[in-house]
Image: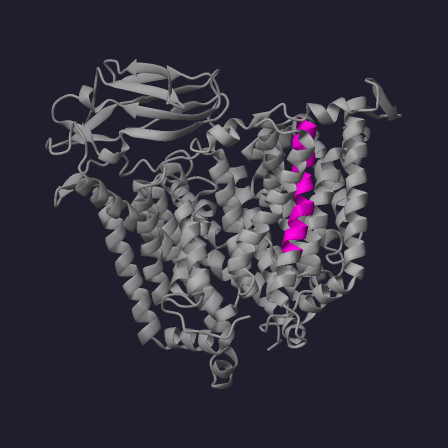
Amino acid sequence: MDWIQILVAGVLATVGPVTAGYALSAIGLNLQFGYAGLLNFGHVAFMLMGGYGTAMTVEFGGPLWLGVLVGIAAAALFGLLIGIPTLRLRADYFAITSIAAAEVLRLVVRSSWAEPLTGGVFGIQGFAGDFHGLNPFPAGLYGLGPFVVTGRALWVIVAGWVLVLLATLFVARIMRSPWGRVLKAIREDEDATRSLGKNVFAYKLQALMIGGGIASLAGILFAVEQQSIYPASFEPRITFIVFVMVILGGAGTIWGAVLGAAVFNFLFFGIDALMARLQANVDWIGAILSPAEAGLIKYVFVGIALILLIVFRAQGLLRGRDEGLGDAT
Amino acid sequence: MALTVGGGEGRSIRGLIRLLAGAAGILAMLALPQPALAEGEILGGTLTYRAGDERTPIEGVSVTVSQNGTEIGTAVSDAEGRWEVPVPGAGSYAVSLDIATLPEGVTLTDPTRAELPNVAVIGGQRKVVIFPLTEGEGSVAGGGVSVYVRVGALLVAGLKLGATIALAAVGLSLIYGVTRLVNFAHAELVTLGAVLAFVFHVPGSGPGWPLILAAIPAILLVAGFGWLQGRYLWQPLRRRGTAVLSLMVVSIGLSFALRSLIQLTFGGQPAAYPDFAGQPSMIVLGVPVVPKHLVTIAVTIAVLLLVAQFLQRSRTGTAMRAVADDRDLAESSGIDVDRVIQVTWVLAALLAAIGGVFFGLNESVSYDMGFRILLLLFAAVVLGGLGTAYGVMAGGFIVGVVVEMSTLVLPAELKIVSGLVILILMLLIRPQGILGTRERIG
């Protein structure tokens, strides 16, 4: 068993573009769920809108910077479309609609009907040359000890973490504004806020759209890094992973989303590397699990982590409004 | 599965661990051998039709595979009825059978499925494509299919899909009624029912009982699982006064954990029950209908009528409605609310499992079969009114029929979009549902 390699896999994942992307997604969800109390179970759709908005714009001849703007706008528009019918209603209706809309969006994007636009299951490739052309780091290997990355990866890492920093400072700034205080008031007591004359619906809708816009940066970062985008990258499991990150780090705290993404990815990729090595080296584990099955273990862990986090840290982390059945009997 | 917990946090934690261990125990039984992967991607199948008890291969039938309108290849079935078309890689292909090349007196069981527009092939897979064939009376063989026949066939398909949706959605709605929890893990009860029946049914993975017999322990096990999660997960959380928003996050975590566990043990590939596969269709009022679909619809309606009788007549059923209506009032009039909630969990899980077995029988069994119809369950529940029973029963059938009928105008792979359309339209127009009573919202 090579513990150093497992550790290196975990650490590289923690500082890499994967964590930067997930951190952006978590910052967006934190604004929606942690601050505004919106149960967005279709979060991955905002990432999809960002990634596909960018890729499709470039594919149809637009420049990459325009693609990024289109991606952000598309995600905000998606928030508007699912928010209008649901945010006036009880919280469960928004949760139901968001998970349904996200899954339908993915099915439409991957359908052969949409293939002329989205490339169907084959996706779109090679649209981010402009970004990689700007790379100030010469080709070669950069690193400290066992942690080595290529110049190309370093450029994505730097760009990604700058975005994470900007997004965090942006959320910190707007949450300190009067707008942010109203949002927190809505989370704590919606009726009281409404009785003060605030348009609760409009605030929720704005939080959904802004959070979605931030999350779209995650989809854009992943697509640009890979130079390719496929519908299979936007499966519902992404949403639940981001939920675990937000709750793990502390919903409704400024740095919680970034911390949660880093800690989660360290554990997630560490477990993945650990399971792969256990599968290959420990006979009885190799006998029950195929390599593909060993790779699935980490998803079971995500689901159980979500349950355990809420069970053991329910009120402290969520700060959600008690919807009425909470009274102990 | 080893779970260690430091410090005694009381009964709820032990309960949770017992629940998870129980779930793992059920799922550990599902370990099935995985099929070996062949080199290169191939689409293929065997064309046979059933005459009496014998399967007769059909030679000389032409099958064409294409992608985005570009033909990839054509194969003609050999003396054993086999055909194969190698494809360039993973992706989605259209497979069509030339009805004109079928011999006299043989016809497709479902005349709307001569062309399968969206057959997904994954890397390294030898994908088997099935065209169920039957001895036809010649009424629909060859030529175009009339609109009447097409609508009739889609109506039956919709009612059959609606049966599963209605069975599962009623439970989802009842759980919401008595606990105010939207249980996102409900779809996994559907999957679990179908998968457990598969385990008891298929030789090699279990006792190899006939499907009808195998369904009974599967449904009872899922009902037991419903009781377990009600007692050891949701009751302790309720006692702690956990907010409903948090409970929904727990349920989505449970859904994800269960789905991944089923994928781990059952495998990622869909499988079919051997019993009643490729059943020949019969002609009812000029429309070809597969008998198992009619049985599905009839049994479902009978089960739902029993549930309605139970809710309307029995003491427990009345108590259930009372708790759903006003929990505090019900409790203060002497109803044992915890017991009523437990009965609801068992009933909901039982109905979902029955729906799952029917779904597996009529389509196929896969680890994400429940999740794929979760959206339709929500559409049915919102259409009928969250928390109601009778409205949701009707809602399930309406959603099923609308989804199938939508293929008249939508590509078949996008039919699920119509479920989302129903959901959003209802939320805009009448969020309390067709039979729900108006309440003050927002």
Instruction: Characterize the magenta stretch by its predominant secondary structure.
Output: helix
Considering depth in this image, is B376 or A47 the residue closer to the camera? A47
Residue sitting at x 71%, y 69%? A185
Where on the picture, by quarter, is residue B206? top left
Q: Residue at x 74, y 36 (%)?
A: A270
Question: Can you see residue A276?
Answer: no
Q: Is the residue B407 above or below the residue B439 in the image?
A: above
Task: Residue at 74% x, 58% y: name it.
Answer: A252
Q: Is residue A220 magenta?
A: yes
Measured along the vertical axis of the image, is residue A292 above or below residue A140? below
- Residue B78, image x and y in percent? 26, 13
Work out whether residue B440 or residue A59 is closer to the camera in this orientation and state it: A59
Quadrant location of the C terminus of chain A in the rendered image? bottom right
Depth check: give the residue in front, A153 or B189: A153
The spot of residue A55 in percent (x, y) is: 61, 31
Residue closest to the eye, A242 or B268: A242
Q: Which residues are magenta?
A: A207-226
What colour scheme does the image use? one colour
Residue B407, visible in the rendered structure: yes
Q: Quadrant of the N terminus of chain A?
A: top right
State whether residue A56 is above or below residue B77: below
Outermost bottom residue: B333
**In this image, A256 relative to B333: left or right?**
right
Residue extending furthest right?
A144
When asked about the image quadrant of residue B369, the answer is: top left
Relative to B296, B231 lies left or right: right
